């Protein structure tokens, strides 16, 4: 399995932010955004926030096993930011965290429901060839 992992900002005396952004197209008919996350973070050290169109949709901390999260999205375009933040208040030094907190977030299995209009078929890929793609 492959996951997106937050970067290692350990030791930074100031706030550090890393985002992964999902852009949802204009013709999206609404549905659920589903993803799995392991968020072994704890404020004020670090935090994981999901923003939908600039508004906090979820804040996920101290999750030690992959957990499925589902968010409802209305029809139309959306910008979803999966945001890892380190040293939230620019503290130097940061307080210590419990040893079971890994200080990282793993994001996996992101899917968007109702991507295709009713009655349509999902696109299929052409057969694989050895021809170069130009």
Image (cartoon, rainbow, N blue to C red):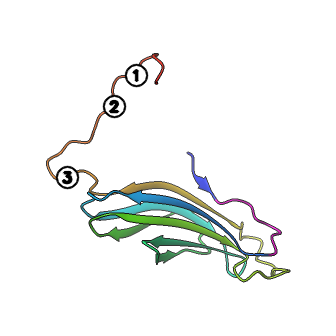
- Check the image and name the residue furthest to the right: 93
Q: Position of residue 46 (x, y in %)?
A: 68, 74
Q: Are marks 1 and 2 in contact (CB under 8 Å)?
A: yes
Q: Position of residue 81 (x, y in %)?
A: 50, 66
Answer few, some or many: residues within 10 Å of disc 1's Cα (few below 14, many 20 plus, some between 14 and 19). few
Q: Residue at x 30, y 59 (%)?
A: 26
Q: Residue at x 53, y 63 (%)?
A: 37
User: Mark 1 to mark 3: distance in Å?
Assistant: 27 Å
Q: Are marks 3 and 2 in contact (CB under 8 Å)?
A: no
- Check the image and name the residue furthest to the front: 134
In which quadrant of the rendered view does residue 100 lie? bottom right
Please give the residue where the numbered disc 1 appears in the rendered image: 128
Q: Position of residue 101 (x, y in %)?
A: 71, 71
| Residue range highlighted in magenta | 6-13
Is 100 in the magenta?
no
Please give the residue where the numbered disc 2 appears in the rendered image: 125
Is 11 in the magenta?
yes
Q: Are marks 1 and 3 in contact (CB under 8 Å)?
A: no
Disc 2, SS: loop
Answer few, some or many: residues within 10 Å of disc 3's Cα (few below 14, many 20 plus, some between 14 and 19). few
Say which of 18 and 36 sits in front.
Answer: 18
The first of marks 1 and 3 along the sequence is 3
Disc 3, SS: loop
Question: Is 6 above or below relative to 129?
Answer: below
Q: Main secondary structure of the magenta part?
A: loop
Q: Position of residue 6 (x, y in %)?
A: 65, 60
> What quarter of the picture does the N terminus occupy?
top right
- Relative to 98, 111 lies left or right: left
């Amino acid at each position: 399995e492959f996951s997106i992992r937050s970067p290692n900002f350990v030791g930074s005396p100031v706030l550090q932010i890393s985002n992964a952004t999902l852009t949802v197209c204009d013709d999206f008919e609404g549905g659920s955004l589903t993803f799995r996350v392991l968020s072994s973070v704890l404020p004020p050290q670090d935090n994981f926030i999901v923003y939908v169109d600039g508004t906090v949709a979820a804040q996920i901390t101290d999750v030690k096993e992959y957990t499925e999260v589902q968010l409802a999205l209305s029809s139309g375009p959306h910008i979803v930011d999966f945001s890892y933040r380190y040293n939230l208040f620019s503290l130097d030094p940061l307080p210590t965290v419990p040893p079971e907190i890994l200080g990282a977030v793993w994001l996996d299995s992101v899917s968007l429901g109702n991507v295709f209009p009713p009655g349509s078929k999902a696109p299929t890929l052409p057969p694989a060839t050895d021809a170069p793609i130009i």
